[in-house]
Image (cartoon, helix red, strand yellow):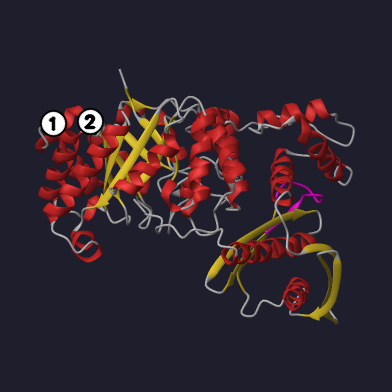
Amino acid sequence: MPRTITIFDTTLRDGEQAPGASMDHSAKLQLARQLARLNVDVIEAGFPISSPEDFESVRAIAEEIEGPSIAGLARALPKDIERCWEAVKPAAKPRIHTFIGTSKVHVEKRFGKTEDEVLQMAVDGVRLACSLCDDVEFSAEDAMRTRLEYLRDVVEAVIEAGAKTVNIPDTVGYATPWQMYETIQYLFENVPNIDETVISVHCHDDLGMSVANSLAAVRAGAGQVECTVNGIGERAGNASLEEIVMALRTRGDEFDADTNINTREIMTTSRMVSTLTGFVVQPNKAIVGANAFAHEAGIHQHGMIQDRQTYEIMRPEDVGLTESVFTLGPRSGKHGLRSRLEKLGYVIPDEEMEEIYERFLAVADRKKRVYDEDLHVIMRQASTEAMPEVWHLERVQVTTGTALEPMGLVVLRRNGDTVTTVSHGNGPVDAVYDAIGKIVEMDGLEMADYSVRGITRGQDALGEATVRVRWQGEEAVGQAASLDVIEASAQAFLNAVNSLLLRQRARERGEVEEGPARPVL
């Protein structure tokens, strides 16, 4: 009988740490609900001591979400562990996940301690966590650059201290699959009490081998894999949940292992993560990319007509992809809209339905057909626009052409007063951004990245703009969508500007507490 591999999803913790991917409280709850539908075994909801906001989000997820275990991350420090327990204890199945770096560079350079001192900190942290919570996980940060004999001693000691799961992270994406296999195998052969715990891995993708390393660990005996939807996360990201799950499902002959994941929820979850974070999924991304089940070459198309197995090793419907279309348009009612939104993973209170329906009609009146991707955008915009603004976009207008210098006119409103500015640029978007910059008067404001894409199909597709800006050492990402890409670009830029200004206000009022830097496992 195949082993069941535990899927530990850290999209809300490690995934959310990707620059520009941060989610607000409501977005985290929304994604946690979808992760429960996906049937992940563990949701790592956040790093509670990092900020009051993160603490409240973890606690809210612990209070509401049923099914998966709810984990919080904590350094091997009493204040972290106690704060983490306060956040996760309302959960039906709480977990404290504590960690400390064990590689030479962490022990000597980061902590300035000896290996024995760090080992004792690990043991003390696990013992404290076990006194509070029945389910404790320990991670040896940077395990794959840790001396093997020392890693063995740490693993043995934390198991004896009560850790039910021990994680062996490839924190910097340094390992190769054969090195990962040999390390896990070594631990199984040399840690005498290893049968008392579940061995886990958490692999980063700096060298593009995170999924391969995770699967090598499973082959060597690991029982848990830590991963994120779409592979998002620090630097190059994490091992992709969907790739690991479908690799185990498709190649059961190689791994003799499977997961509890409801694979038909994979596509919905992937699209929700992309929408909430603004991180576009590359077209050729395995499993969830737009081209993953597309066939253009004539030879491939002919083969597919004869037998789909000629060029497909998975069925699109197994990951929730289908060609059937739920048609929504200007004459669709609230019940049909609510039904479709619920299938897409959204929970809509009755008091918010009227506003959502009005937003839907505004799009439907301008389009022949409203697709699921449009609905994701409508829901994200409803969440974004519910947030406070410093500047509000009243109007944008551009003039451009082959023989004209691009000009942008922008009208912004603040505290009831409107300001109008006209500016020129290298193109219409550049002209609009220059005009906005003149109005908001933020010295040193810099646009770091800009992209625009069509969300759905056809000439009437919504255009989605994503902008990353820098100001005074901070970054913010703005995103917006409209049938007019210039309007979407202007609103996305302004959303990022508002985010930076609101953060500045919060600091000035003392509402932002500086927590520890978020860790990468």
Q: Is residue 435 above or below residue 13?
A: below
Residue 212 in view (yes/no): no
Q: Nearer the viewer, residue 75 or 216?
A: 75
Q: Residue furthest top?
A: 1
Residue at which label 1 appears: 193
> Which region shows up in magenta?
455-465
Mark 1 crowdedness (10 Å alpha carbons): few <14, some 14-19, many ≥20 = few
Q: x%, y% of residue 115?
A: 13, 55
Which sits in the foreground, 304 or 355?
Answer: 355
Q: Which residue, given by chain and number where applicable, does mark 2 sit on?
A: 197
Q: Main secondary structure of the magenta part?
A: loop
Give the tally of numbered discs: 2
Residue at x-position 74% and y-position 79%? 426
| Residue 398 in which image quadrant | bottom right
* Secondary structure category for the residue under label 2: loop
Say which of 39 and 47 sits in front.
47
Q: Residue at image x 32%, y 31%?
A: 133
Check if residue 27 falls in the magenta segment: no
**Measured Cα–Cα span from mark 2 to mark 1:** 8 Å
